[in-house]
Image (cartoon, helix red, strand yellow):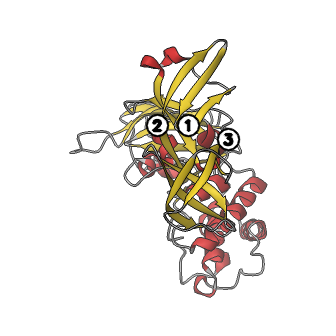
Amino acid sequence: MFLGVSLLGVHYAGRPSPAVHNVTFNLQAGEIGVLIGPSGCGKTTLLRAVAGLERAQAGSITLGQEVVSSRAVHVPAESRRIGMVFQDFALFPHLDVARNVAFGLAHLGAGERQRRVADVLDLVGLSQTGARFPHELSGGQQQRVALARALAPSPRLMLFDEPFSSLDVDLRERLAHEVRAILKAAGATALFVTHDQLEAFAIGDRIGVMYEGQLHQWDDAYALYHRPATRFVADFIGHGVFAKAQILQRGSEVVVRTALGDFADMHECPLPSAYPGGQCDVLLRADDIVHDDDAPVKAQILRKSFRGSEFLYTLKLKTGETVVAHVPSHHDHALGEWIGIRAEVDHVVTFARDGAA
C-alpha cells in the first residue's frame, strides 16, 4: 500500500452532514486511481484532503509509511511532496515552457535543473517546445506541460482535479490514454477526480464511485460494470435498467423469472431465501438484451440514440416495463415499431425491491 485512506471524515462548518464520511481505500505504488460521481458527491473534497488542503476530522490518510492526516496530525500541503494538475493548467503565461517546467526545481543546480526539464519534456513528448510560450501551444500540449511541471520535482503522489474538462470531447479520451502511458512510464502513483466515465475507464487501474460523501465501491472498471456493489453504482455506471424478478428453486436449479423469460444456470445467483418471497429487482445492461426478429418477446421502440456503429434503443415490453439495448446501426427501426428481443445474461446482479443494495 502506498496511499491509504481509512475511515476518513471531512466536515465543513455550517453543513448538517459530512462532505466525506467513513471513506476507506488503498492505492498501491505505481497505480492510478480515479474518483467519479455526481456533482457535490465529495470527490473533490476527498482529493483536497489527500493534498493537505482540507483537514481530517476523522480517520486517517497515509502516504508510504507516514500518517499525513488524522485528528491529531496534519502535515502541511507543501511538506507532502505531492504534485497537482488542475482544470485550467495554471501555467505562467509570461514564462516559456522550459521555465514553467523548472518552476519547482529551484533547489537544484543549473545543470541538473536543465537536465531534469529536458527529461520530463521528453517523457511527455514535448522535447522541442522548451522555448515556446503557453499561448503558442494547443490545449492538449498545455495539459502535457502542466503534467511535466508536476512530475519534475519527482513527487510521491500525483493528484489531478478534472484535468481534461476544458478540452473538447474528442481530445479528452485520447489525452487520457496518453497521460496514462506517461504516468506508467514515469512509475508515478496518481489519483484523479473526474465526472466522465469514459475518462475514468481509460485511465484508472482502480475507480471509486462516490455519492453523498460516501465511497460506494472501489474496484476496477469491469467489476464496477458487471459486479456493482450497490444499487447506486449499478445505476450510475453504464446503461441499464432494474427489472422486476422472482428467484425460484426448481429442483436443484435456481431460476430467475422476469418479463423476458426465465434465466437459469446463472453464475453467483442468490438463493430465493435472499429476498422475501424471492422478489427482487435484477439489473439488465444494454448488452444483456439482443435484437432477434424471431424471438417470442416483442418490445416497442420508445427512444433511440445513434452512436455510430450502434443504436441505443429504449424499449417498452407489453408488461409496461422498459429495457435498453445496443443494436447494430444497420438495424434502423422506426420509433413506435415493435421488434423481437431476447436476453443473453451471463450472470445475475440483484437488489432488494425496496431500492436497498
Query: Would you name the residue on which mark 3 appears?
Result: 344
The residue at 53%/23% (across/down) is: 247
Kindly state the secondary structure of the residue where label 2 is placed.
Answer: helix
Query: Would you name the residue on which mark 2 appears?
Result: 231
Whole-number angstrom distance, CA of label 1 to CA of label 2? 7 Å
Is residue 86 toward the left or the right of residue 187 in the image?
left
Q: Nearer the viewer, residue 4 or 212?
A: 212
The C terminus lies in quadrant = top left
Q: Which of 57 and 202 is in front in this view?
A: 202
Whole-number angstrom distance, CA of label 3 to CA of label 1? 19 Å
Is residue 207 toward the left or the right of residue 356 in the image?
right
Q: Which of marks 3 and 1 is in front?
A: 3
Q: Classify mark 3: residues with Cα within 10 Å, few (<14), some (14-19) or many (20+).
A: few
Question: Residue 120 at x, y = what percent?
Answer: 74, 66
Q: Which of marks 3 and 2 is in front?
A: 3
For residue 228, the mark is 1
Q: What residue type is labelled 1?
A: Pro
Q: Looking at the image, is mark 3 or mark 1 earlier in the sequence?
A: 1
Q: Looking at the image, is mark 3 or mark 2 earlier in the sequence?
A: 2
Question: Residue 177 at x, y = what percent?
Answer: 71, 61
Q: Do callouts 1 and 2 mark residues in contact (Cβ within 8 Å)?
A: yes
